[in-house]
Amino acid sequence: MSALLDIREIACRYHGHTVVRQLSFHANRGQIVCLLGPSGCGKTTVLRAIAGLEPVTAGEILLEGRLLSRRGFMVPPHKRGLGMVFQDYALFPHLTVLENIGFGIRNRSRRERDAQAMQLLETVGLAGYGKRYPHELSGGQQQRVALARALAADPKLMLLDEPFSNLDIDLRERLGMEIRELLLERGITTVLVTHDQHEAFALGDMVGIMNEGRILQWDTPFNLYHEPNSRFVADFIGQGVFLRGSMRSAEQVETEVGLLQGDRAYPWPAGTAVDVLLRPDDVVPDARSELRGVIVQKAFKGAEILYTLQLPTGTRLLALFPSHLHHQVGETVGIRIAADHLVIFPVEDHSQAAPPARHSSH
């Protein structure tokens, strides 16, 4: 696959402050990539720079090898061949749904525009809504119209900026998957910006974790969860608890919950003080285990229940049990640690990235 979008070492300034610095990534044809990070990390600025709405002060942005932006040079937004869907949808209130979609279709007769707009309405599941106005639609319906309008211009690249954040969670998940299928069917390369990791993991082929204007890790959702390369990424992705431990060997760590054996080797010598990340799915129920914890909190999540367990030492762990194993607060349960992907950071420097792990042959 060849890269359709290439971001090379870009920097952006906003009100005199550098908000994006030395940022690089690429998106292959037909790929959906996500920029994920906390508010103020610079992800929307990156999207606006790709759209041609923000200048870059260093680096380059290329689309199909064509230069779009560099310091002192910017191709205007309407000449970039992009589709954009923003958080507020930005539909024209005085135009009907059909007219809103047709607005993005140029150099066609009125009849051809209407026919194409009607076809796109059907594509996004809104056949028969063409004569309505935006205020007569729900948030999810407005979002579909905004997407149809962006698709109308047959873009090479789609930019989505927090497009589902105004919707309730069930609609957000359903619409997100529908839109992913639609974009993949049409082979449209897409860059999505979000602060919601569930959204990024569900929709993105590749995800970049951003903080303070930089991408800290560009990887698959699986690797970000199981092999975070820094303490920040480990903390930001998923839920979990850091447990103090001591390296016994390159692949073993002694902790208060026992000796943990991982599937990779770390270079720190025996005796090194480390923090081990335990995810809720690393803590599994085991009625025969000597390791026991008292349930101090519980949160029902449908198929699973998230328990907060307190160990005899006072340490608390998070554990996901199948919901048919229904326990009460105050109850003591047996658990074992099933952490094959051990994520470990040295105690002396919490900002230090984990070294490249060598996967064990055991």
Image (cartoon, helix red, strand yellow):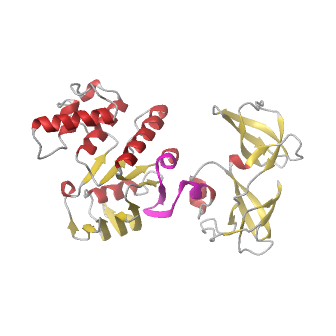
Viewer can see residue 18: no
Q: Classify residue 241 as left or right of residue 68.
A: right
Query: Is 205 a magenta residue?
Result: yes
Q: Classify residue 20 as left or right of residue 354.
A: left
Query: Is 217 a magenta residue?
Result: yes
User: Looking at the rendering, which quadrant does residue 49 occupy?
Assistant: bottom left
Q: In the picture, which quadrant includes the N terminus?
A: bottom left
Viewer can see residue 167: yes
- At horizontal 10% and vertical 36% (from top left) the residue drawn is 110
Q: Classify residue 212 as left or right of residue 223.
A: left
Does 223 appear above or below 116? below
Q: Magenta segment range?
A: 200-225
- At horizontal 9% and vertical 40% (from top left) the residue drawn is 109
Between 98 and 166, the one nearer to me in the picture: 98
Between 123 and 68, the one nearer to me in the picture: 123
Does 54 appear above or below 115? below
- At horizontal 78% and vertical 37% (from top left) the residue drawn is 295
Q: Residue 355, percent across and down?
A: 63, 71
Q: Residue 344, percent across and down?
A: 69, 63
User: Looking at the rendering, which quadrant does residue 248 occupy?
Assistant: bottom right
Q: Residue 317, percent across and down?
A: 74, 47
Q: Residue 150, percent across and down?
A: 27, 44
